[in-house]
Image (cartoon, rainbow, N blue to C red):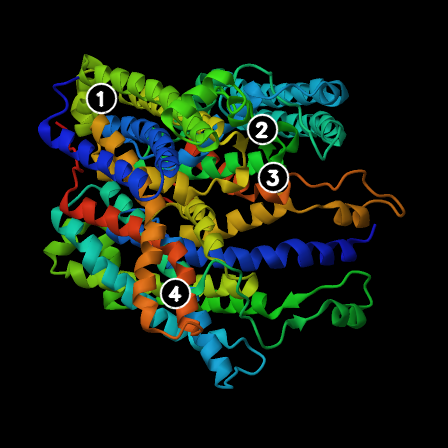
Amino acid sequence: MDILNAFVTLLNFVIIPATAYGAQLALGALGVTLIYGILRFSNFAHGDTMAFGTMIVILCTWGLQGAGVTFGPLPTALLALPVGIALTGLLVIGTDRVVYRFYRRQKAKPVIYVIASLGVMFIMNGIVRFIIGVDDQRFADGERFIISARTFRDLTGLEEGLAFRTSQGITIVVALIAMGLLFWFLNRTRTGKSMRAFSDNEDLALLSGINPERVVMITWLIVAALATTAGTLYGLDKSFKAFTYFQLLLPIFAAAIVGGLGNPVGAILGGFLIAFSEVGVTYAFRKVVEYLGPEGWSPDGLMQLLSTDYKFAVSFGILLIVLLFRPTGIMKGKSV
Amino acid sequence: MTRSLDTRALLMFALVGMLFVGTGFVQSWNIALGIFNMGLISAIMALGVNMQWGYAGLFNVGVMGFAALGGLAAVLVSMPPQQDAWAAGGVQVLLGLVLGAATIVLAILAWSKLPAGRMRALTMIVILVGGFFLFRSVFDTGVAAVEAVNPSAAGYLGGLGLPVILAWPVGGLLAAGAAWIIGKTALGLRSDYLAIATLGIAEIIIAVLKNEDWLARGVKNVTGIPRPVPYEVDLQQTEWFLDLAARMGASPVIFSSIFVKLCYAALFIVVLLALIWLSEKAWNSPWGRMMRAIRDNEVSASAMGKNVKARHLQVFILGSAIIGMAGAMMTTLDSQLVPGTYQPLRFTFLIWVMVIVGGSGNNWGAVLGGFLIWWLWIQVEPIGAFVMQGITAGMDPDAWLRGHLMDAVAHMRLLTMGVILLVVLRFSPRGLIPER
């Protein structure tokens, strides 16, 4: 029995990575859920919006690095983030003007918006591939670790090392700040309140003089900020590849639906739920069990429930369970 | 059937036909026929999507998964069985699968038969967890044994060794089974939920194909799937074929390749025509009117006593079966199953562009869209390269920007498809051949 080492292993391979991944998913799911709440459709272009924002951040980071500007121990990408958010904001507002506003005026069915968002997805995907290509791009710089495995071992004298990467720390901190800002905005400011009113009851909101176009524009801006931040954090943590961002769509949607579409708190809960299940189910628990079991004993198999290739199956499985038993999500979301 | 095609539609078909004939003259007949064959398959997939979207308003973005299941059927039906692998662990793998299925059935039974309460949930969890570990212990050893048999050339169970044409209906059945599972859970909820559920199942099907080596060799790919048509090399040694080639004044090598493509085209055309005939019959039947009534107003349709959810499930399964069939035909045409090539943009969203552009709710429109968009998808790249050559002609040949722009041509097609989709959706939302 060696509980301490078992716990450190678990922390190192499951809890920390899942928290970082969960924060990224939560930011992504917040974007999806906001669009759903205000514009009332599932935005399939969200993954590619994230990819676009991240691409701008990467290009800007390269420019800064070229000019010799760095952010000390922190990644330069954080400096480039505002530029990415601004340009992505311009792009999504432009998209709204050119594409979605027309259907809003027509009061088109939600599914028409979804199809339009497919078209937007194609175009954004094309633009990203056109500019930065399809290859993996790494753009993290600065200190790699807050605590490296070796330092931790020396510090505590434990057998297991604990590596806490800067990108993971930054992800958690930035995500907390972003969520705090969002909830402050939604609950305390006039504009935020008008957004919530619009989401709850469109007719009543219109009646009380809320300008729908303004609400929609601000929603898109917030979504651009959330998407760019989520994408950049994911890229710093792992790496940037256009196709991976498209594939993130599934866990992000799963998180938003599991939490209850249109409910921001639910989106955050959903993000962490999906991330922890994905990492937990695909992690090989052999080492942890080894530490917990009697001395000198080790389990036969890897103690892995599913191979990592099936991580999509995890988010999908959770999604199915929620759809079967509680279609409105954990937190009460919009109508079924 | 003639009623359904007015002058405008015929004109459209003539125009698209001219695109193919033009390709034949400008590039080569071999290329034109190659595009035409895939166009036929795309048209069938578009028919399936149109059945779901145009008839019933169901939004399926898992086309890729259903097509891949069809491809799997081609392998399972037509490849020769691997006797050694079966002897090593085939039975055990099957037993594992049966155990897994039994667990799920048992859990569902427990859920529906036991009285509601904490005991029920607990029983179900115990059944599921216990069943999972039992399944893994039986299944994993079987899989390891199968995959150890001659892994470089086989390492899988093989198929049944039957004619590959049989795989087409089997592919339809496999896809229908998957559609039943999805439909049972996601239909009856918001339309977006079906979309996300289908998106998920498609990714999972591809993940299974990539990772379950015992099934279809995973990313090692299955090649050399038997053909329903003669092989070029055999034709080139056949007396009558050489005579025919000589009479046509063509070289036997090129002519054999064209001849094989024509054989495929004939098979596919038969399937396509049969499906169009059936679809049109269904569209004009009371059943078709009922589907449209449900699509246009679910509340009033259910007030008339129509079971909306059951009808949706029915049409969802039918459409998916057609897509699965087309997927099997595609794998037959390629003679290989390469799971890595299944990309959602190419297999799911492109089919959607075909349906929207061609005209949702019109079978002929879907077919037209299939041919037109497939032709564009292939030809945008050479056209783009040509245009880009013109744009960058003034630049220094070694300039960085020029190289980047020329490389980027490969991504033009996504951009073009997105623009086409948005433009059609906005300015001609009913498509090129609108619903009557």
Q: Give x and y (percent) for residue A19.
A: 56, 57
Could you tell me which residue is drawn at 75 percent across and 18 percent down?
B87
Mark 4 packing: few (<14 Cα in 10 Å), some, or many (20+)?
A: some
Front of the two marks 4 and 1:
4
Looking at the rendered structure, the kind of residue marked 2 is Gly
Residue nearest the viewer, comparing A119 with A133 = A133
Which label sits in the foreground, 2 or 1?
Answer: 2
Res A73 visible? yes
Q: Tell me where residue B291 appears, x and y as whole percent.
A: 22, 21
The alpha-carbon separation of the residues under discs 2 and 1 comes to 42 Å
* Numbered mark located on residue A160 in the image: none
On screen, residue A205 above or below B107: below
Type of amino acid at the residue the image marks with label 1: Met
Considering only order in the chain, which callout, 1 or 3, is on the residue closer to the N terminus?
3
Host chain of mark 1: B
Q: Residues within 10 Å of mark 2 (few under 14, many from 20)?
A: few
The numbered dot on residue B219 is 3
Could you tell me which chain the residue with mark 2 belongs to? B
Going from the N terminus, do you reach mark 4 or mark 3 first?
3
